[in-house]
Amino acid sequence: MKNIDPNHIAIIMDGNGRWAESKKHSRLWGHIKGSQTAQDIVEAAINKNISYLTLFAFSTENWKRPVSEVQFLIKLLERHIKKRKADLLKQNVRVLCVGDLTPFPDHLKNELSDIQKATSKCTGLTLIFALNYGGKQEILQAAFKAAQAAFSSSSKLTSKEKFLELFESHLEFSTIPDPDLIIRTSGEQRISNFMLWSSAYSELYFSPKFWPDFSKQDFFEAINEYSCRQRRFGGLKHMDPIKESLA
């Protein structure tokens, strides 16, 4: 039996710098073109009636890049948010951010806070920006907070299932459905510390194209391939694989 279209698509937008270098441009030009591609793919997700779209916009590892590139990425993100705010409201798009925003400058944090508040009542696509986000860090933070809560609680946790619920409630993606499909561009075939917990049973799609060359048609092709796959979640029927294993 074929799948219906994915409810939640997450994208590792990889290859901006290499795309620019292959065309004898600066890496910064690649990021500008990549932001334009992101806009096109958001439009495609809206047209396809996708419920959730997560864009891996800035990882915890991206701080290792040259300072000038990091500063440019921050300015580009702020400019993109300002420019797109009115359109996103008009398109009924709700914006969320996950990750530790603490290290970012106040002017960017204010823009991100404003757009999340402004779009909070929108009921169309939920667009999630993963910023200063890492999958290992998400799991570590959730485990630490869950352990603190368990030790300080007067009520004892009597089963692994109850602790699982407590743990998952502290995940940064706790209120967002697990991704059905994860797309990575640039030909790299790994998920690079992205959504490690919630991607346990996601379908993976790797495109050889650098992100700036990834088109709406490429996006639709990824969805079509997903729709032809069978998802058994490790069993013979649709089930929650983690909770089944704890039963």
Image (tube, rainbow, N blue to C red):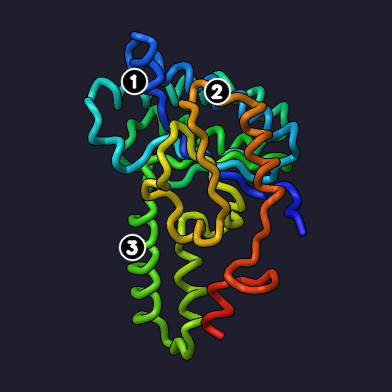
Mark 1 vs mark 2, CA separation in Å: 17 Å
Residue closest to the eye, 91 or 189: 189
Mark 1 — residue?
Answer: 72
Q: In the rendering, at what x and y percent does residue 29 appear?
A: 39, 13
Mark 3 — residue?
Answer: 140
Q: Is residue 210 above or below residue 171?
A: above
Residue under the image location 33 percent in, 68 percent down? 144
Q: Do the residues labelled 1 and 2 touch (CB within 8 Å)?
A: no
Mark 3 vs mark 2, CA separation in Å: 32 Å
Which class describes the residues within 10 Å of circle 3: few (<14), some (14-19), or many (20+)? few
Disc 3 vs disc 2: which is toward the camera?
2
Which class describes the residues within 10 Å of circle 2: few (<14), some (14-19), or many (20+)? some
Q: Are marks 1 and 3 in contact (CB under 8 Å)?
A: no
Going by the numbered disc 3, the residue's amino acid type is Leu
Going by the numbered disc 1, the residue's amino acid type is Phe
The furthest residue to the top? 24
Q: Is residue 74 left or right of residue 241?
A: left
Q: Is residue 208 above or below residue 232?
A: above
Q: Is mark 2 on a helix, strand or loop?
A: helix
Q: In the rendering, at what x and y percent does residue 120 appear?
A: 63, 42
Q: In this view, does 103 lie to the left or right of 159?
A: left
Check residue 142 in the rendering and tell me which mark sits there, or answer none. Answer: none
Mark 2 — residue?
Answer: 37
Q: What element carries label 1?
A: helix
Q: In the rendering, at what x and y percent does residue 229 appear?
A: 67, 53
Residue under the image location 33 percent in, 35 percent down? 104
Q: In which quarter of the image is the C terminus?
A: bottom right
Residue under the image location 49 percent in, 42 percent down? 97
Q: In this view, does 89 lie to the left or right of 10?
A: right
Q: Is residue 48 above or below residue 26?
A: below
Going by the numbered disc 2, the residue's amino acid type is Thr
Residue closest to the eye, 245 or 189: 189
